[in-house]
Image (tube, helix red, strand yellow):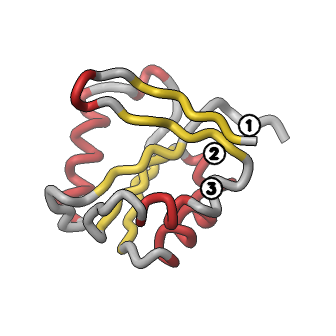
Amino acid sequence: MSSVIRVNLGPMSYDISVAAGNLDRLGSLMSSLKLGKKALLVSNPEIFAHYGERAIASIENAGFQVSSVVLPAGEQYKTLSTVQSIYNSALEHRLERSSTMIALGGESLEI
């Protein structure tokens, strides 16, 4: 079963798809959006350790060139300095206007 959540931002609105198996289909879902072929995956250490390689494999299998940046988790890290780190990574990996940034995050996992 899948759900779609609409984020209403006027002309910049978008949908969020929530469904089992979407992580392994991420690349094919991105392909249908006519995006540039470079992508930057942004995550935190815990989430990246569990899901990062699967997300990257899915994106690369769809023909994208993927780079990643792993940042500390927590509200205290949501700062302009952290945004600067993301921008620096984007520049380092030569992202372009047509490139895509993917946020891979969520609540802490209990295993």
Going from N to C along the chain, the mark reached first, 2 or 3, is 3
Q: Are marks 2 and 3 in contact (CB under 8 Å)?
A: no
Residue 106 point in image, percent of width and height: 60, 34
Among the two numbered marks 3 and 1 on one chain, the one whose residue lies closer to the N terminus: 3
Query: How many neighbours does mark 1 have within 10 angstroms: few (below 14), some (14-19), or many (20 or more)?
Result: few
60 left or right, relative to 110: left
Residue drawn where x is 30% and y is 70% of the image = 37
What is the quadrant of residue 76 in the picture?
A: top left
Query: How far across and down, in percent of the image, does residue 80 sit?
Result: 24, 28
Label 2: which residue? Answer: 46
Q: Quadrant of the N terminus?
A: top right
Amino acid type at mark 2: Glu
Q: Which residue is mark 3?
A: 23
Could you tell me how far apart the alpha carbons at marks 2 and 1 are, in whole angstroms? 8 Å
Residue holding disc 1: 109
Question: Can you name the residue that lies furthest to the right here?
Answer: 111
User: What amino acid does circle 1 point to?
Assistant: Leu
